[in-house]
Image: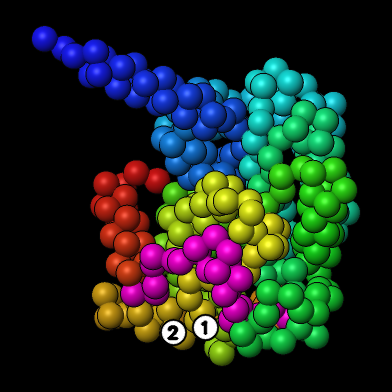
Amino acid sequence: MISKQTTKCFIFGALKSLTIKYFIMKNILVTGSVGQIGSELTLELRKRYGNENVVAGIRKTQPSGELKESGPYVVVDATDIKNVSEVVKEYKIDTIYHLAAILSAVAENNPQAGWNVGVNALYNVLEVAREFNCSVFFPSSIGAFGPSTPLDNTPQDTIQRPTTMYGVTKVTGELLCDYYFKRFGVDTRGVRYPGIISNVTLPGGGTTDYAVEIYYEAIKNKKFVCPLAKGTFLDMMYMPDSIRAAIDLMEADPSKLKHRNAFNITAMSFDPEIVADEIKKHIPDFVMEYDVEPVKQAIAETWPNKMDDSAAREEWGWKPKFDLEAMTIDMLKAIGDRYKGNSW
Ligand code: SER
């Protein structure tokens, strides 16, 4: 016999979990979903919130594989406010991860496009978020700092006078996000990403791309020609940590956030020699040569050697899981397996 008490508990339990489910249900739009971060973040968000609830926003490049099969996708040009507004309305979006971006070296070659995608598109996203009451995640970058910033243990709040168009758009973006929160109450949150290392989708035209390419070249040719000079230290992070950072921050208790936007986050800092030596532990005959690219080198020299990310650690519990050693093992295995299977 089932007692009245048990029945009551069961009904109460079912109602409670329904209520919780209702309140945590999200409809998410990811702009730039086929990019380096977007392609992996979208899949992780689908695992957490349900495939149907995460819309992959694309521009020209069509999604493929699991990204295409696992959930909805839609063409959205973030530089067109009408288009953003239509998509948000149609899919009843309440959270936007705005990842559409042009990386630093490409933006330096085409500063007009850098501004359009870096600032005008973000402005459109924020305006639509204001109208439809959406939360917004915006990725800033180590590029938001410049030569007059203290480059060692770069503080959370410090001088920001970047000398690249990419950096100018990131500082503008940080300020816009703060403004939309303070002025309109839009729930904006964001981090300053370091160079991100991953083995699914290649980055395109960033200053830190060498730290991805070196792993592919080590597996394919046992040789890498490095575009940054020996001694150029930069902050870096493995993709699983970058994704967790974005989602954890968006789920963090807002009452604990003093900054909300532009949190410094890092997982490791190295120069080309250090990552090459780590790879040599696994591929002893790996060799690296240097052919320094002046544009990338000039950019890298204005960026921090190592950021202080204590504000992120204190305010929402940020802590990376991968250091250089663990990341190198994982990268070489993932790329090596794919290379053996010839699936690229
Ligand atoms: N990875 C970016 C770049 O190199 C920096 O955020 O452009």
Pointers 2 and 1 in contact (C-beta within 8 Å): yes
Quadrant where the image shows the N terminus: top left
Which of the 4 image quadrants contains residue 335?
bottom left
Figure colour scheme: rainbow
Label 1's element? loop
**Range shown magenta:** 302-325
* Residue toward you, 260 or 77: 260
Measured from the top left, where is residue 265 in percent x and y?
57, 68
**165 relative to 112, above or below:** below
Q: Residue at x 28, y 60 (%)?
A: 333
- How many neighbours does mark 2 have within 10 angstroms: few (below 14), some (14-19), or many (20 or more)? some
Asked if the stretch drawn in magenta spans residue 305, the answer is yes
Q: Residue at x 46, y 59 (%)?
A: 241
Residue at which label 1 appears: 271
What amino acid does circle 1 point to?
Asp
* Residue toward you, 226 or 263: 263
Measured from the top left, where is residue 322 in percent x and y?
39, 67
Number of the label disc, if any, that sits on residue 210: none
Residue at which label 2 appears: 274
Q: Residue at x 32, y 55 (%)?
A: 334
- The answer to whether any part of residue 146 appears in the image is no
What amino acid does circle 2 point to?
Ile
* Residue toward you, 320 or 166: 320
Measured from the top left, where is residue 153 in percent x and y?
61, 85
- The answer to whether any part of residue 30 appears in the image is yes
